[in-house]
Amino acid sequence: MEQHGHFCPQCSRAISLGDTILVHNGRPAHLDCRRPRMLTPDERAVLFSYCLGHAVAECLACACRFHLGQLTADYICPQCRRDLTETVRAHVYRCVILPAEIRVKMEELRTASEHLVKQSRELIDRSDVLHREAEVVLCERRQALRRALSKRS
């Protein structure tokens, strides 16, 4: 059975807890289907406001740390071309330069986003259960009708 809530309505790929989402027609959808785990506009705003003067990403493959200005807009390592988005995101949530209030608000926003995805999954799972229960009742009623019809003949 198709599960609409677990998939992005725009690209039909699964939505995971770490994906960057928006609400599209009442359902979670990827902010950018080509890059489902991209940084949110809020995360980028924090980076540009507080983190321009220090390293924000580390490439384990190259053993190098990079400032924001050394990375491409997609947060790709300039040496080995690996995606460093997750290390940049981790920096945003643990940067000691950020005021505590900003860090708390960022964490609340991320938690709310994850909660929305989980809630959507729960609603779809519940919807699937109700649909299956309705199918069982429908099947039982059809069989009862057929038994009643066969008794008449």
Image (cartoon, grey):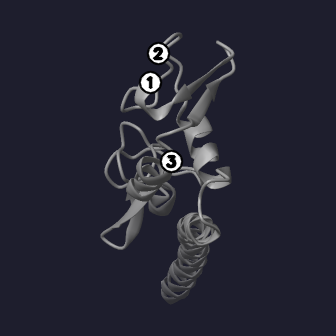
- Which circle's residue, 2 or 1, is located before the other in the chain? 1
Give the number of the disc on residue 14.
3
Where in the figure is residue 88, as x and y percent of width and height?
56, 39
Q: Inspect this view and state whether residue 71 appears.
A: no
Between marks 1 and 3, how big is the CA–CA gap?
Answer: 32 Å
Between marks 3 and 2, how big is the CA–CA gap?
Answer: 29 Å
Name the residue rendered at 47%, 55% in the picture: 46
Where in the figure is residue 39, as x and y percent of width and height?
46, 47
Name the residue rendered at 58%, 33% in the picture: 55
Q: Which residue is mark 1?
A: 70
Q: Which residue is mark 2?
A: 78
Q: Are marks 3 and 2 in contact (CB under 8 Å)?
A: no
Q: Amino acid at mark 3?
A: Ala
- When asked about the image quadrant of residue 93, the answer is bottom right
**Left or right: residue 22 compared with residue 67:** left
Name the front one of labels 3 and 2: 2
Name the front one of labels 2 and 1: 1
